[in-house]
């Protein structure tokens, strides 16, 4: 985690500055103003949250597809083995 924070030091600095600004408003008793900032920030990044969810959905679909392909491969091998055994038994 430390490496990720160091690699993104500008974003970390900006996040820290935003926290200080909100903390200053809260310390001054301007709760409504701080909550307003929060709402604005959430609206700005709503698209990002949707993109994050889309990425998660795609990763799950890929994972499911890989599992489906693995099951298909196993079933194909099983059927091949069963047919092979049946043919060998029938030929004897």
Image (cartoon, rainbow, N blue to C red):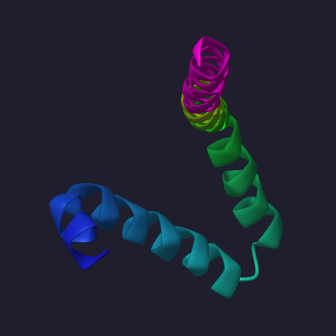
Q: Give yes or no for residue 84 being in the magenta stretch.
A: yes
Q: Is residue 67 above or below residue 36?
A: above
Q: How many numbered marks have been drawn onto this rendered protein structure?
A: 0
Q: Position of residue 72 (x, y in %)?
A: 62, 23
| Front residue (pair 22, 83) | 83
Q: Is residue 74 left or right of residue 32?
A: left
Q: Quadrant of the C terminus?
A: top right
Q: Main secondary structure of the magenta part?
A: helix
Residue at left 65%, top 35%? 53
Residue at figure coordinates x 75%, y 53% from the top left = 36
Q: Tell me residue 19's x, y (percent).
A: 50, 71
Q: Residue 46: image x %, image y %? A: 67, 35
Q: Can you name the residue that lies furthest to the bottom here?
A: 27
Between 79 and 42, the one lying in front of the other is 79
Residue interval drawn in magenta: 70-92
Q: Nearer the viewer, residue 39 or 68?
A: 68
Judged left or right of residue 15, residue 24 is right
Work out which residue is located at the far front of the displayed protein and give it. Answer: 92
Please report the residue visible at 75 percent of the width from the left and 48 percent of the height from the top. Answer: 39
- Write the residue at 64% across / 23% down: 89
Q: Does residue 54 show up?
A: no
Q: The N terminus appears in which quarter of the rendering?
A: bottom left
> Does the magenta portion include 17?
no
**Which quadrant holds residue 33?**
bottom right
Which image quadrant is residue 23 in? bottom right
Q: Is residue 20 left or right of residue 6?
A: right
């Amino acid at each position: 985690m430390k490496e990720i924070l160091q690699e993104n030091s500008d974003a970390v600095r900006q996040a820290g500055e935003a926290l200080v600004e909100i903390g200053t408003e809260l310390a001054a008793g301007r709760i409504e103003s701080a909550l307003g900032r929060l709402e604005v920030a959430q609206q700005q990044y709503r698209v990002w949250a949707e993109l994050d969810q889309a990425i998660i959905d795609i990763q799950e679909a890929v994972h499911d597809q890989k599992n489906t392909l693995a099951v298909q491969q196993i079933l194909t091998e099983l059927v091949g083995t069963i047919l092979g055994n049946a043919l060998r038994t029938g030929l004897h």
